[in-house]
Image (cartoon, grey):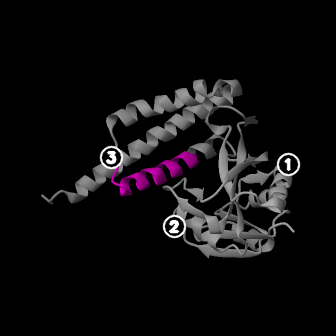
Amino acid sequence: MSARLSVCLLACDEEALLPRCFDSLGFADEIVVVVDAKSRDGSEKIARERAQRVELRPYAGDVDQKRYCSELASHDWVLIVDPDEVVSAELASSLRAVLDRSECDGYEVDRVTRHLGRWLRHGDFYPDWKLRLFRRSRARWQGRDPHGRVVVDGAVRRLTGELQHYSYADLAAQVERIQFFSAEAAAALHVEGQVARWHQLLLRPPARFARAYFLKRGFLDGAPGFIVAVATAFHVFLKYAKLWELQRATRRGNEPAR
C-alpha cells in the first residue's frame, strides 16, 4: 500500500492561479494551504473550497511560512508546491510510483518556467532541480529568505516529469517580483550582518548575466532568454543596492542628533 501524501502550499492574492494548481493535485491525499493574512482577493475562499486544511497567518518570511505549513500536514510525506506551479501528468505518475516503494527520504523535481510566450529550457531558469518531495520526519528547513530550502537526512533521488512554472503573467509582473524578492534578500543579509561592497554592485550583476546568457546558453531561448538574463542581473544589482541602502539608514540612525 502506497504512503499517504500531503501537498503544502502558500497563497497570497493568487485567486487567478490557484484553480489551475489545484486541478493538477488530484493525486494528493491531503492539501494544506497557509494563506497570508494580508491577502485581499479570493485566495482564501478558493483554498477552503478545494483544500482539506486552510489557515490564515501573517507572513513571517518564506522559510518560516513554509516550515509552518509543512508542520500542519497530517502525513509524513510532503510535497511543496507554489500556486503558480502545475504538476504535470508525468510527474504525478512518477511521484505516486516512488511513494509505492518509498526507497528514499527525499526527491528532487525539475521545474520548467513559461515566460514571455515560451518554455525556457536554457539559462538560469533551466534545469531547475528542487527538493520538493520529502519525509517530514527526516527533513528540516534552512537558508535565508526569500529562498529557503529543505535538507533531508537520508538518500535523495530525482523524479521524472516536470513541474510546470507559470511564474509571471508578463514582464511587469517579473519586475514587481524582482522588487519584492530583492528587498527580502537584502533584509536577510542585513540581519546577518553582511555588508554591501562596491565590487558586488559593479561585478556581480554582469557576472550573473554572463552565466545565464552565455555559460548556460540562455541565447538559445531567443529574445526571452536575453530579457530574462538582463532581469536576473538586475535582481542581483537591486539586492546589493538595497543592502547598501539599509546599511546607510542604520548608520544614520546611530548617528548622534545635532
Mark sitting on residue 195:
3
Say whether marks 3 and 1 touch (CB < 8 Å).
Answer: no
Quote the CA–CA distance across marks 1 and 2: 34 Å
Whether residue 242 is visible: yes
Q: Where is residue 204? Give x, y as percent.
A: 44, 33
Q: Residues within 10 Å of mark 1 (few under 14, many from 20)?
A: few
**Which residue is under mark 2?**
60
What element does badge 2 sit on? loop
Q: What stretch is highlighted in magenta?
A: 176-195
**Disc 3 versus disc 1: nearer the observer:** 1
Residue at the location (48% across, 54% down)?
Answer: 184
Quote the CA–CA distance across marks 3 and 2: 23 Å
The prevailing secondary structure element of the residues shown in magenta is helix
What element does badge 1 sit on? helix
Say whether marks 3 and 2 touch (CB < 8 Å).
Answer: no
**Which residue is under mark 1?**
90
**Disc 1 versus disc 2: nearer the observer:** 1
Residue at the location (12% across, 58% down)?
Answer: 258
> Between disc 1 and disc 2, whose residue precedes?
2
Q: Identity of the amino acid at label 3?
A: Val
> Between disc 3 and disc 2, whose residue precedes?
2
Q: Identity of the amino acid at label 2?
A: Ala
Residue 41 shown in magenta: no
Q: Residues within 10 Å of mark 3 (few under 14, many from 20)?
A: some
- Report whether 224 appears left or right of 230: right
Q: Where is residue 131? Give x, y as percent.
A: 65, 53
